[in-house]
Image (spheres, rainbow, N blue to C red):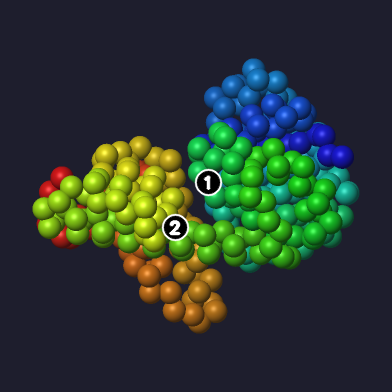
């Protein structure tokens, strides 16, 4: 049974996830370029590492939770990276949201060293990380998934093995398409309610009892009517995820017009200075386009 865990990337998601593993009794070695979350976790019982390599040297399995493809590649393959410290038989689990192609390339390189990899991106945001209720979508060998499953169960509630390397990222991409388009649909509906002279919050509550009910309508719709755009999930992150989807779709020659629209709308939010607002802030650019004043 895996007991010695490493965690690299202690941001909005990584820090509470590391805390969950500490609370579950795992030995956790942590590293981040920002010292503050490292200090907090060390006070909670984690072991400090000075590099990704040192994390790997101390761990049976290493989790990375990083902003994007470039950061993951640097941490795994770069100088003082995971590859330099991980031992034969070790496991690397990337829980970031990155390209399926990047996952496959990293998995091949790690396999040459006798190391297994899983891609295990998550959905559920900061709240899900804090409550250990994340949805975890996993790609990689089924036997390695089974070895890591007890760890995943300390981090989330809905845990699925989707298929081979990259499958977790494909599932996460599908999730991000649905969430993006649902945010856009909720924003349009609430703007329609406001523009016709009725209270969008009353309309939102009424819709929660019908077929339009969704987690996005419940949570993000409330953010829209409350004008609360303090980030749970940032525009920056969702915008990046959708750009990955569009890139893969271009390679596959498939048409995703709604996804492209969401990408353009988040570009508009970013242009208004909202790159680090909550992704429900998509409503703001649609309001501007519709002449709605709030």
Q: Residue at x 44, y 45 (%)?
A: 233
Counting from the top left corner in percent of width and height, residue 148 is at 78, 47
The residue closer to the viewer here, 271 or 190, is: 190
Which residue is the site of mark 1? 124
The residue closer to the viewer here, 51 or 144, is: 144
**Relative to residue 82, is residue 244 depicted above or below?**
below
* Horizontal side, residue 202 vs residue 251: left or right: left
Q: Residue at x 75, y 60 (%)?
A: 140
Single out the residue that lies furthest toward the top. 43
Mark 2 neighbour class, 10 Å CA radius: few under 14, some 14 to 19, many 20 or more: some
Q: Residue at x 11, y 53 (%)?
A: 197
Residue 174 in sight: yes
| Count of all numbered marks drawn on residues in the image | 2
Quarter of the figure with residue 267 = bottom left
Which residue is the site of mark 2? 179
Quarter of the figure with residue 16 = top right
The residue closer to the viewer here, 35 or 145, is: 145
Q: For the residues marked 1 and 2, what is the alpha-carbon distance in whole angstroms?
A: 11 Å
Q: Quadrant of the C terminus?
A: top left
SS category of the residue bearing label 2: helix
Counting from the top left corner in percent of width and height, residue 182 is at 39, 60
Mark 1 neighbour class, 10 Å CA radius: few under 14, some 14 to 19, many 20 or more: some
**Relative to residue 79, is residue 182 depicted above or below?**
below
Tag 1 and tag 2, C-beta contact below 8 Å: no
Counting from the top left corner in percent of width and height, residue 44 is at 65, 20
């Amino acid at each position: 049974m895996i007991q010695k865990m490493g965690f690299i990337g202690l941001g909005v998601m990584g820090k509470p996830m590391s805390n969950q593993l500490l609370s579950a009794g795992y030995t956790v070695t942590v590293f981040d370029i920002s010292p503050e979350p490292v200090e907090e976790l060390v006070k909670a019982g984690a072991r400090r590492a000075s590099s990704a390599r040192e994390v790997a040297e101390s761990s049976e399995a290493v989790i990375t939770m990083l902003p994007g493809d470039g950061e993951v590649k640097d941490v795994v393959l770069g100088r003082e990276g995971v590859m330099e410290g991980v031992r034969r038989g070790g496991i690397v689990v990337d829980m970031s949201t990155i390209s399926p192609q990047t996952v496959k390339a990293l998995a091949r390189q790690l396999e040459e060293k006798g190391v297994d990899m899983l891609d295990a991106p998550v959905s559920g945001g900061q709240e899900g990380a804090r409550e250990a209720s994340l949805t975890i979508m996993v790609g990689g060998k089924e036997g390695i998934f089974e070895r890591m499953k007890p760890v995943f169960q300390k981090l989330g509630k809905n845990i699925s093995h989707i298929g081979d390397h990259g499958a977790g990222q494909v599932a996460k991409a599908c999730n991000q398409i649905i969430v993006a388009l649902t945010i856009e649909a909720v924003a349009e509906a609430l703007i329609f309610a406001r523009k016709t002279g009725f209270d969008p919050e009353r309309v939102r509550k009424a819709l929660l009892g019908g077929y339009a009910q969704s987690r996005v309508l419940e949570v993000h719709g409330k953010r829209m009517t409350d004008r609360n755009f303090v980030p749970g999930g940032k525009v920056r992150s969702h915008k990046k995820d959708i750009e990955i989807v569009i890139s893969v779709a271009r390679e596959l020659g498939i048409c995703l017009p709604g996804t492209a629209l969401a990408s353009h709308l988040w570009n508009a939010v970013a242009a208004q200075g909202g790159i680090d607002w909550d992704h429900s802030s998509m409503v703001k650019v649609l309001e501007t386009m519709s002449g709605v004043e709030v």
